[in-house]
Image (cartoon, rainbow, N blue to C red):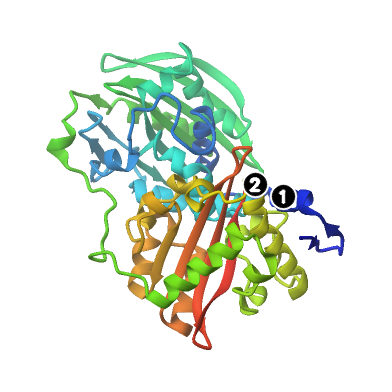
């Protein structure tokens, strides 16, 4: 079956996937509200790239479990699982891991146009298995971020991995490398690197000072940023407060983990379940474009793109409806074209482990079995699904408006891992229109 591109070109079956591949990450320059956004992104790339289990990380390692053990008292941060206590410089407003993640999400959106949903699926799911965010801080004169990385993950990158780690924050903003070496605090040796650069897009100077050391089963990185050179003196005083002690066992601290907060899993309505299966059959098995599009209401072609607005091949606000329909159909039908006919859905949507546990914990189906997510949406479930770094999500606000207008909705997420290793996720919002369940909005994550 042929498709029509937005310019009117007729596409044969071999071109469908190519049109979908136009949805690449069109990075847009911009100023993040925190220079540390770049630093943590660079750290993640250093530790193994986008998505999946980080090389060398312990099996089933979840950074959020370790983060949940952190306690804050004044300017003092304590994490017994790592065996670490330290104080932040005076005048700093302390930020815990969830707050840091929200700030990071805002910064990523401002810098690249990538919202928290895409950021998590592309990078955060892997970051969750590699980088522990400990408490940091911010003030008028600078910022501090402290992160911990499992030693097996770091050591897998060679004997100089600690040196590479301490140099990463400066390299993240293309800063000029300054003094490097080692310093000793309270009997522990720390790798140290200083750098000086200009924050891209703001023409604002940044003086970076980073310290890294091994603390029991982790490498810990202190990443300090000052906007004036004279304020760098505050960093050394903070390092004098660091104490590394024997860690507590995980069972002794019992940090909170994401879990279902809305009670027992609710059953999907039989008429919706039937309608969804019919859609997946004509879309994935029969590969019938016309029948698949019959499940998409015209409202979907008029609704604004939100998550996928950073994808160069996705539609834009104001794109004519017929062009939007063509773009959506190409992206939809490109999914089964990646796989042999009669490939089961669970063998197509193998990127399901990139979805946040906050989402899968609230699913109405068994995501581990089905490999796609179904969730019933109302005011309460939205609050549970979109918490932590998703709190300020523009997509969350859109869904809240839709729930307010239309009441009971279903949200179905299809996470595909393409043959080239890229992730492509389709988000569909379903509502009853004239007593029939139909897709009222489609969005994507592209890589």
Q: Quick check: can you spot residue 224? A: yes
At horizontal 33% and vertical 34% (from top left) the residue drawn is 61
- The number of numbered discs placed on residues in the rendered structure image is 2
Q: Camera-side residue: 183 or 367?
A: 367
Label 2 environment density (alpha carbons within 10 Å; few <14, some 14–19, many ≥20): some
The residue carrying mark 2 is 338
Question: Quadrant where the N terminus lies?
Answer: bottom right
Q: State which quadrant residue 3 falls in.
A: bottom right
From the image, state whether disc 2 or disc 1 is nearer to you. 2
Q: Marks 1 and 2: in contact by CB < 8 Å?
A: yes
Checking the image for residue 340, the label placed there is: none
| C-alpha distance separating marks 2 and 1 | 7 Å
Which residue in the rendered view is the most extreme toward the bottom?
434
Q: Position of residue 297 (x, y in %)?
A: 61, 78
SS at circle 2: loop
Mark 2 vs mark 1: which is more N-terminal? 1
Tell me if residue 290 comes above or below residue 188 in the rendering.
below
At horizontal 69% and vertical 70% (from top left) the residue drawn is 290
The residue carrying mark 1 is 17
Q: Position of residue 384 (x, y in %)?
A: 34, 63
């Amino acid at each position: 079956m042929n498709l029509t591109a937005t310019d009117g070109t007729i596409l044969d079956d071999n071109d469908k996937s190519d049109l979908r591949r136009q949805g690449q990450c069109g990075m847009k320059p911009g100023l993040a509200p925190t220079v540390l956004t770049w630093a943590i992104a660079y750290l993640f790339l250093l530790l193994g790239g986008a998505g999946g289990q980080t090389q060398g990380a312990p099996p089933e390692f979840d950074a959020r479990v370790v983060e949940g053990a952190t306690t804050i008292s004044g300017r003092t941060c304590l994490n017994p699982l790592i065996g670490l206590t330290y104080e932040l410089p005076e005048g700093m407003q302390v930020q815990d891991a969830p707050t840091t993640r929200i700030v990071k999400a805002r910064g990523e959106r401002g810098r690249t146009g990538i919202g928290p949903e895409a950021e998590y699926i592309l990078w955060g799911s892997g970051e969750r298995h590699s980088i522990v965010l400990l408490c940091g801080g911010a003030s008028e004169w600078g910022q501090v971020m402290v992160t911990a990385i499992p030693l097996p993950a770091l050591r897998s990158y060679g004997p100089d991995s600690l040196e590479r780690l301490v140099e990463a924050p400066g390299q993240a903003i293309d800063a000029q490398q300054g003094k490097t070496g080692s310093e000793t605090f309270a009997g522990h040796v720390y790798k140290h690197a200083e750098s000086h650069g200009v924050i891209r897009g703001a023409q604002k100077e940044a003086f970076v000072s980073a310290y890294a050391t091994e603390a029991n089963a982790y490498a810990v990185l202190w990443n300090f940023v000052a906007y004036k050179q004279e304020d760098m003196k505050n960093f050394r005083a903070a390092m004098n407060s660091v104490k590394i002690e024997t860690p507590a066992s995980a069972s002794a601290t019992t940090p909170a983990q994401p879990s279902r907060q809305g009670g027992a899993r609710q059953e999907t309505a039989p008429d919706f379940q039937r309608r969804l299966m019919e859609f997946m059959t004509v879309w994935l098995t029969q590969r019938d474009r016309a029948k698949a599009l019959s499940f998409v209401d015209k409202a979907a072609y008029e609704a604004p793109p939100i998550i996928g607005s950073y994808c160069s091949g996705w539609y834009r606000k104001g794109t004519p409806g017929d062009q939007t329909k063509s773009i959506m159909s190409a992206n939809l039908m490109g999914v089964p074209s990646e796989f042999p006919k009669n490939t089961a859905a669970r063998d197509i949507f193998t990127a399901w482990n990139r979805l946040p546990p906050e989402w899968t914990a609230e699913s109405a189906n068994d995501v581990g079995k089905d490999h796609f997510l179904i969730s019933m949406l109302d005011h309460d479930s939205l609050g549970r699904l979109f918490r932590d770094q998703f709190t300020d999500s523009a997509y969350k606000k859109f869904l809240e408006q839709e729930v307010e207008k239309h009441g009971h909705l279903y949200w179905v997420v299809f996470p595909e891992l393409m043959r080239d290793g890229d992730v492509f996720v389709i988000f569909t919002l379903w509502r009853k229109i004239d007593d029939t369940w139909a897709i009222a909005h489609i969005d994507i994550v592209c890589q």
